[in-house]
């Protein structure tokens, strides 16, 4: 009973901010101390869905950047983690992968910005993609490094002993076993890019518009209803993806015991 109550409380704590955000996105007037909006309206959604205020461009840019970053980081991270797993200095290399998260964000951001200006990547879509890729790639390496254990090595050796070539080992042995974890990595690295604000603001220099930037711009201008409506899109799309594929939620808890 205690566990069921804790689960229900957790669900409520997660749902309340989402419901509040949705209410704010359709509110016309909501005065204190009312617990419910005095009036509702859909004008902010009509403004957004009509393509005004650059929402469509920001949505397309966010999706494009996040997909490229997720696919690139997961692919590179999977291959890199395999090489690190067999390296004699595995611990040192994994520590290096932690550096993007250990260094001061201010120092790292200023350094990246200077380097990107020198490389003429600042204020460009590919500059933002590359900046986010550095963090997503490091995360993917750390996440996927746990996949390469003695069982995977033994299965690979067994496949090789019965005549499988390198491509067949990857395609028929390693990738099927890693499919669930690769899905988690894709989703997590997608979220790293999707919710990024600092790198898009700093490296994009205002020329690359994404949904998080649009939300903060609306808040900065005092248009809380449009900010809430944009926030619903920002949170709702990843949440819908999770609900459509609930295995993403179960995999991290069961992968270690069931497959690896």
Image: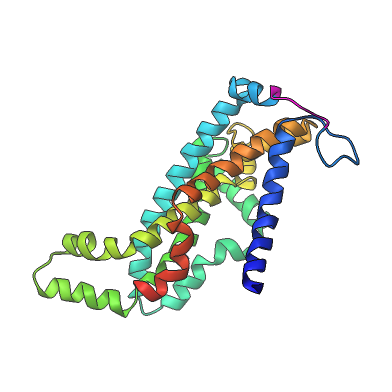
Direction from residue 60 to residue 179 in the image, left or right: left
Residue lying farthest to the left in this orientation: 163
Q: Which residue is drawn at 47% across and 71% down?
A: 94
Left or right side of 153 for 7: right
Could you tell me which quadrant the C terminus lies in? bottom left
x, y percentage for residue 90?
41, 76
| Whether residue 119 can be seen here | no
Q: Give the range drawn in magenta.
A: 38-43
> Is 89 one of the magenta-colored residues?
no
Give the percent coordinates (x, y) of residue 167: 18, 60
As displayed, is residue 39 above or below residue 102?
above
Residue at horizontal 40 percent and vertical 49 percent from the top: 71
Residue 17 at x, y percent in the picture: 71, 48
Q: In which quarter of the image is residue 179?
A: bottom left
Q: Is residue 75 visible?
A: yes
- Above or below for 151 versus 38: below
**Image x and y of residue 33, in percent:** 91, 41
**Viewer-nearest residue: 174 or 9:** 9
Picture colour scheme = rainbow
Q: In this view, does 258 lie above or below 192?
A: below
Judge from the rendering whether residue 87 lies leftward or rightward of residue 213; answer left or right: left
Total residue callouts: 0
Which of the two residues, 144 or 257, is positioned nearer the viewer here? Answer: 257
Quadrant that contains the N terminus: bottom right
Which residue, as the protein is rendered here, is positioned at the far right?
33
For the point 74% across and 36% down, the residue is: 24
Residue 229 vs residue 51, the one in the foreground: 229
Q: Residue at x 36, y 80 (%)?
A: 88
């Amino acid at each position: 009973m205690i566990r069921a109550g804790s689960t229900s409380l957790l669900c409520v704590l997660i749902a309340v901010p989402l419901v509040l955000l949705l209410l704010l996105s359709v509110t016309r007037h909501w005065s204190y101390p009312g617990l419910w909006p005095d009036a509702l309206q859909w004008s902010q959604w009509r403004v957004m869905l009509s393509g005004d205020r650059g929402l469509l461009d920001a949505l397309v840019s966010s999706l494009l950047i996040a997909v490229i970053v997720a696919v690139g980081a997961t692919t590179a991270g999977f291959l890199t983690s395999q090489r690190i797993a067999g390296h004699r200095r595995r611990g040192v290399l994994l520590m290096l992968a932690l550096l993007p998260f250990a260094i001061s964000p201010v120092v790292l951001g200023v350094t990246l910005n200077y380097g990107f200006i020198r490389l003429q990547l600042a204020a460009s879509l590919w500059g933002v993609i590359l900046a986010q890729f550095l963090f997503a790639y490091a995360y993917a390496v750390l996440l996927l490094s746990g996949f390469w254990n003695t069982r995977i090595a033994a299965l690979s050796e067994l496949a090789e002993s019965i005549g499988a070539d390198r491509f067949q080992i990857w395609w028929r042995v390693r990738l099927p076993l890693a499919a669930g974890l690769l899905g988690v990595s894709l989703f997590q690295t997608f979220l790293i890019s999707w919710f990024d604000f600092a790198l898009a603001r700093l490296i994009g220099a205002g020329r690359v518009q994404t949904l998080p930037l649009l939300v903060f711009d609306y808040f900065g201008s005092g248009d809380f209803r449009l900010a809430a409506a944009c926030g619903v899109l920002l949170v709702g799309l990843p949440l819908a993806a999770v609900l459509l594929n609930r295995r993403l939620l179960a995999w991290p808890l069961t992968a270690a015991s069931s497959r690896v």
